Image (cartoon, grey):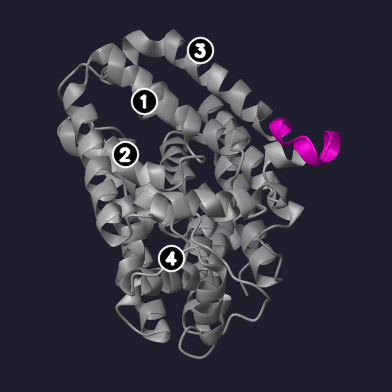
Amino acid sequence: MSSPGASRKLGIRFDFAEAILGIACGLAFTTAFAYCIQIPLHPVGTRDYIVYWATGKLLLHHANPYNPTLIGILEHSAGLTVPGSYYMRNPPWGLPLALLPALFGARAAAVLWTLMLLGVLLVAVRAVWPAVGVPNNRLALLGYLFPPALNCVISGQTSLFLLLGLALFLRLHKSRPFWAGASVWFWTLKPHVLLPFALVWLAWVLLTRAWRMLAGSVAAMAVSCLLTECLDPRAWMQYLHWSRNSGITNQKIPCLGVALRQLIHPASFWITFIPLLVGSAWALFWFARHRRHWNWIEHGSALVLVSIFVAPYCWIWDHSVAIPALLFAVCRTTSRWPLTLLALAYIVIDLQEIFGVAPHSWLYLWPGFFWLAWYLLARARATPSPAAWPAENNPVLPALG
């Protein structure tokens, strides 16, 4: 058995940060793998994915996708054990997404849906590499194995599409403005998650007269709405009726706005939006302050994390959109301690998942604050921004890192 002195003589140095990162990535991969291999063995109705499968089945049969009786019958036939039924909460223009799993049986569709989400995660992280400046595959593992993203895969949620839209926008907003604008459509699948970020995007588009990008966004939205109209012309009224009677406003969600409401006055729904209003005001101030040299990678990263923190409705899997901002800060910090803290956060979230902490538990309130606080710490210990980083009006995407 070698002694510490012998290790030093051999040039071997124990890196605590690397060790914790290795443990965090290993635990995240093991947890996700263990859950994924259970898909063929356990009822698929226990995952959130079943909502999209049941919704798609009703759409294929030209039935009301928000009918509580019909959707409940389909979900319980696939293994849902709780009373009642769950609904697809995405806006009606997201209904076409539900058609893919509906083409197959519940179990086969669950496998395909999981593989699709894994593919979306891989493409999104790989697409954002040149934008945030990830220098090697090892650091990219922090994106691929981000616990909220893997939680999204496990549960079958659609939050990874928001990440894909954000990654494509960051990658294409200079070279392909029309398609960058079209990628904004993915943000609208859960518009509450990125509201301050989207508000600044709209202000930036108008200020810089990025009409091609705006055209891409309008075109993508028009196509999706047309598809929804073809699938179910009454979807808009059906969704409105469901939203009025769903009781979703009384649901306990681990985010800042809901926590404040529960603490101050549970019956006052408007309290939920106080953080969002403050965050949106700060976002516009942030943009006004940096508008002359605005860079979506550097300045937009803080916007994303603030958007998550103040979102009025945000689950742990919705935090997947934090990946580009966290990777950007990881690649620029000069200290090992931020990396260690980030890895410890990965481990805690994985342990909460392993020990069965329910998604609506207040134990998932801390990550939204942590990502923002950690980002500020990492950026405080970052290398100076290279002089070559241009403002958005320069045509060449800089080679970061």
The reply to whether residue 144 is visible in this rendering is: yes
Which secondary structure dominates the residues rendered in magenta? helix
Tell which tag, 2 or 4, sits nearer the viewer.
4
- Is there CB contact under 8 Å for labels 2 and 4? no
**Which of the two discs, 2 and 4, labels the residue nearer the N terminus?**
4
Q: Residues within 10 Å of mark 2 (few under 14, many from 20)?
A: many
**Which of the two discs, 1 and 4, labels the residue nearer the N terminus?**
4
Distance from disc 3 to disc 2, alpha carbons, whole Å, reads 22 Å
Looking at numbered disc 1 in the image, what kind of residue is underneath it?
A: Trp
Distance from disc 1 to disc 3, alpha carbons, whole Å, reads 13 Å
Distance from disc 2 to disc 1, alpha carbons, whole Å, reads 10 Å
Residue 392 on image: x %, y %: 26, 19
Q: Is residue 100 above or below residue 376?
A: below
Kindly identify the residue that appears in the image at 16 percent across and 27 percent down.
Answer: 212
**Which of the two discs, 3 and 4, labels the residue nearer the N terminus?**
4
Q: Which residue is mark 4?
A: 64
Residue 134 on image: x %, y %: 33, 43
Direction bottom: furthest residue: 41
Kindly identify the residue that appears in the image at 60 percent across and 48 percent down.
Answer: 244
Tell which tag, 1 or 4, sits nearer the viewer.
4
